[in-house]
Structures are given as C-alpha cells and as structure tokens.
Amino acid sequence: MPVTSQPTDQPYGQVLSDEKALERVFRASYAKWVADAKGRLGPDAASAAPRVVSKAFHLAWQDRARIRSQDELDAFIGAQIHHQSARELSRRASVHRLEKNENVSQKDIHHDAKEMTVDEAWERLQHTLQGSVAPEAARQRASTARHGAAEHVKDLAKERKWGPFILIGVVGAAIAIGGIWYINKAGETRAITNALAAQDVRAYNTGIGQAANVTLDDGTVVHLAPDTKLTVPKQFNIGIRAVKIDGAANFEVTQAQDKPFEVRVGDAAVLAHGTVFTVRKYPDENIVVVSVKQGSVDVRLGDSVSAIPTGKTVAAANGALRDATAEETQEATTWADGNVSIVGHNLRFGLVALKRWYGLDVHVQDTTLLSRSVFIVAPLNSPKEAISSVEKSAGVHFTYIGDNMAFEDTVRGRGGRRR
C-alpha cells in the first residue's frame, strides 16, 4: 500500500439496502446462479440448486452491511454457492453411506420434486428472512408428521412385555455410563484434532492489510483480521462444529445448535454457544488472548476448563490462564471495531504491526532505533495516522531511501525526504 494513498474514511455502502433491492438483484441473477450451482452439484444433485442459491442470498442479506459494490456481491454469492454446493454433496454422500451400511431408506434423502421458478424461490427466501418456515418445508414437515403419527399408532397397537428387558438395561447403563462418557469426550477431542489436520479442510486466508468476513454453514459469522488463517474441517456442522485460527478473529456464534462451537487457537480451545468473542494468537506471539463481548465461553487448557464471562479478557501461555493486561486486551480486540492499538512495545514490533495491519513495509537502517518504545493508535483504514503515531512516540520521521519507505531519527536523520 503506497503511503501517499489517502485513507478510505467513507462509511460502508450497501448494495442490498432493503428487501426491494434484494429482490431486484435476486430476480435479475437467479437463472445465472442456478446454472452455476447446477454445474457444481452435478446431474445427480442438480435439483438442489435453487435451495443453494436461496441460501447464498440469505447469507448475503445477513452480511449486507459490508457488501459495498455489485462486484463484491457477486464474489460473495459465488463463494457461498461453492461452499453450499460442497455441503449439499457431502450431506448426500453421508446419507448414501448410512443407506448402504445402516439400512436408512432413500426417503430420508431430501429430493426436490421439480425445479423452483424464480417466483417460488423468492417466496421461499422471503419466508426465511422473516424467520418462518418456507412453504415447501411446511408441506414436507406436515407430511412427515402425519406419517410419524400413523407409525406411532401402529406401534401402540402391538402388545409388548418390556419389564425384564428394562431392568437389565437400567443396570447395564448405570455400570457403563461413566466410562462411556469419558471415552466419548476423549474420542470427540481426537476427532476434532484429526479433522482440523486433514488434507480436505477448507482454508480461508487474509493477506497483509486485508480483512474478510466468512459465514459458516451453521450461520456463525467470523470476522478475520489481516494475516489470518481460518481452518474449517470438511465435516463442519455434520458431526463436528469446530474451527482453528492462526492470527486473530472475532466470532458471532449462532445459538441454534445443541453442540458447542469450538475454536482451536494456539494450545487453547474456546467453547461457546450463542456469544460474541475475539481470539488472537499469531505465529510470532507467545500468548493466546480470548476476550468475551457477549455471553460467556469456556477456555480449555489441557484438562483444565475455565468459564469466562461477558467483559472479561484472559491470556493463556505455557498451560496457564491469567487475566490479560489492559495493553494485551486493547491489542487483541480494538481491530474488530476498526482501530489498531499497539501499546508497550518497541519499534521492531511496531514495524511488524505496520506491515500486518496496513501493508506498509517500512525499513530502519539505524538498528539502534529498533529498541525505542512505540505506540500505534489509529483507524485500520488510515495508514497516514498510523505512521504519524509511530513518528510521535518513537522520535522518528517517515521518509524514502531510494524506493524504500523508512524511518530515520528526527535528530540525526537529515538525508531523507520528510513526508
């Protein structure tokens, strides 16, 4: 990012300003995106394309405040169709395996009888936006309920003598339940570890000076800081609800799940239901920071689990958990609100921060300057203010040496051109 560029202090625009705008875009591009989804789903699952497209637009509506142009909207929809199509294919493959191995009937696989028209698809999306059940889903549920009731009445008509079997089952369960619970928990932790290390994970990477939003299959929204990697297992939301972070991220976790949402970060695991929290652990840092904005989370270190309430920030290092300092809290969390706060570090650390958060590769020829104390307090979209903050706190000035950006001492550095 050239230092001469002006800060982009404009507020986010909104392509999807209201439902009418959403409807216009949806109707205009529906056929194109359905064709795209069909190509990804293949002939056997092509009938699911309208549902995949509707889901993509639903997620775009949820994230509309950050979509500032038609190009950004198209990129978002395209990415979501890719992910939703992969999820649909995975779901169908899972049911197919169950059908083969556990005698699950083909009726358990959802089939779309016919392709939805744009009017039917928009009606479905409207119901979703309003939090009500889509028309075809309501019909399906009603049919399932009727079938279930009939099967239940049929079962009641059969006389069974369960007494001896119930007694045997209760005694056996009482003996085994403790051991099974422990084995299941250990197995689940191992399964998550293996899934996150598998070759088929989905990885989302932000570059230097870039941030991004990712909406996961369960509706959780992840705001990724610059220079961050989010790892999502292929089985996410199908038995596993866990991700891994290398860098920094803010999570808005959906509440519509029984299984807790888990974030692996460094040597810690953060478990949450419906809550908002931030985590940070870059590869060049030796602590994990977890800050809870809403709700509460559990932080697991080894066999120890600690409950962290709203408004508290903790730091984990070397297997121990402690309260984070004010500086650690600011550094880990302010970026989520659009600002960078680096306090209590030297210029060497400040140069890394400038590159990570602003994309500024600034050099210092006089290495004695690197030990000077520095602070950076500036908006994420204003590299000019970030540089000014370094100049004031470290007693340096920004200049160019040839084509390279550099800091020089304000007293001795006279060869460079002052910005």
Image (cartoon, rainbow, N blue to C red):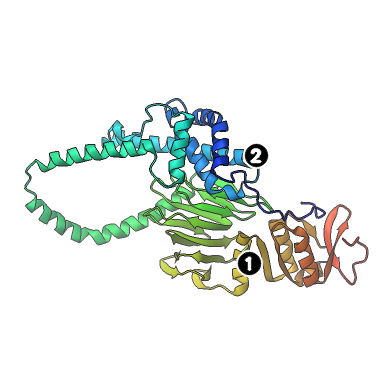
Q: Residue placed at 49% from the left, 28% from the top? A: 38
Against 259, is 74 above or below?
above
> In terms of depth relative to the viewer, which is nearer, 335 or 248?
335
| Residue 358: x %, y % from top left | 72, 56
Between residue 123 and residue 341, name the one nearer to us: 123
Please, what is the three-letter code of the amino acid marked with disc 1? Answer: Glu
Residue appearing at x 42%, y 67% in the figure: 305
Quadrant holding the C terminus: bottom right
Left or right side of 369 for 224: left
Residue 252 shows up from this direction:
yes
- Please state the horizontal and vertical placement of residue 183, each as a whole percent of the image: 31, 57
Residue positioned 10% across, 51% down in the render:
165
What amino acid is labelled 2 in the image?
A: Asp
Residue 58 against residue 287 in the figure, above or below: above
Q: Say if residue 94 shows up in the picture.
A: no
Question: Furthest-right residue in view?
Answer: 415
User: The residue tagged with tag 1: helix, strand or loop?
Assistant: helix
Question: Who comes first in sequence, dot 2 or dot 1?
Answer: 2
At a point 44% along the width and 60% down the height, the residue shown is: 272
Residue ranking furthest to the front: 20
- Crowd class of label 1 (few under 14; some 14 to 19; many from 20; radius 10 Å): many
For mark 2, give the secondary structure. helix
The x, y position of residue 283, in whole percent, is 61, 59
What crowding class fits label 2: few (fewer than 14 Cα within 10 Å), some (14-19), or many (20 or more)?
few
Q: Which residue is mark 2?
A: 71
* CA–CA distance in space, label 2 to label 1: 32 Å
Q: Which residue is mark 1?
A: 331
Looking at the picture, how far across and down is residue 80, in whole percent? 53, 40
